Image (cartoon, rainbow, N blue to C red):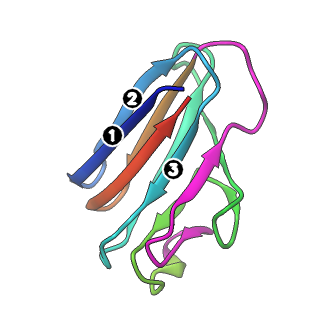
Amino acid sequence: ATLKSVSGQYSQGATVLDQCFSEDFQVIVANPSTNAWTGSITKSNDARLTYSAMYCSTCNPSGLTSSIVVDGDANSGAQAPVACFSGQQCIATQQATTTTTSTLTATMTSTLSMTSTLTT
């Protein structure tokens, strides 16, 4: 398994990670800061022509990562229908197993201070 970690502060609308992977992967996100970030975690199986959301089963509430908020506390629930709160690590996975090359794009719609780990 390959492990890639991305962390730092990102401007609104910034793409945090855009990379191709030849294996199935999952994304682990956590925000140690009490400044929430809201965005999307999507993947493409067709060379970036179309994107689909991943699924976060460890988020509360769980759901598709087309809109997700990640916060070190729990006061930003109105920002997205899927949430990862209290600095916990949440895991976004592919909805269906695929053998094609996938491209991961994580785009945040607010200023981001995050730590995320990608495992394949």
> As drawn, which residue projects farthest toward the right?
96
Cα–Cα gap, marks 3 and 1: 16 Å
Measured as percent of width and height from the top left, residue 112 is found at 29, 59
- Circle 1 SS class: strand
The residue identified by callout 1 is 15
- Circle 3 SS class: strand
- Circle 2 SS class: strand
Inspect the image, locate mark 1, and give the three-letter code of the amino acid beneath it. Thr
Residue 105 falls in which quadrant of the image?
Answer: top left
Measured as percent of width and height from the top left, residue 61 is found at 68, 72
Crowdedness of circle 2 by 10 Å Cα count: few (<14), some, many (20+)? few
Residue 26: mark: none
Cα–Cα gap, marks 1 and 2: 7 Å
The residue identified by callout 2 is 18
Cα–Cα gap, marks 3 and 2: 15 Å
Inspect the image, locate mark 2, and give the three-letter code of the amino acid beneath it. Asp
The residue identified by callout 3 is 28
Mark found first going from the N terminus, 3 or 2? 2
Q: Are marks 1 and 2 in contact (CB under 8 Å)?
A: yes
- Residue at 60% in and 31% down: 25
Magenta stretch? 79-101
Check if residue 95 falls in the magenta segment: yes
Q: Where's the N terminus, which quadrant? A: top right
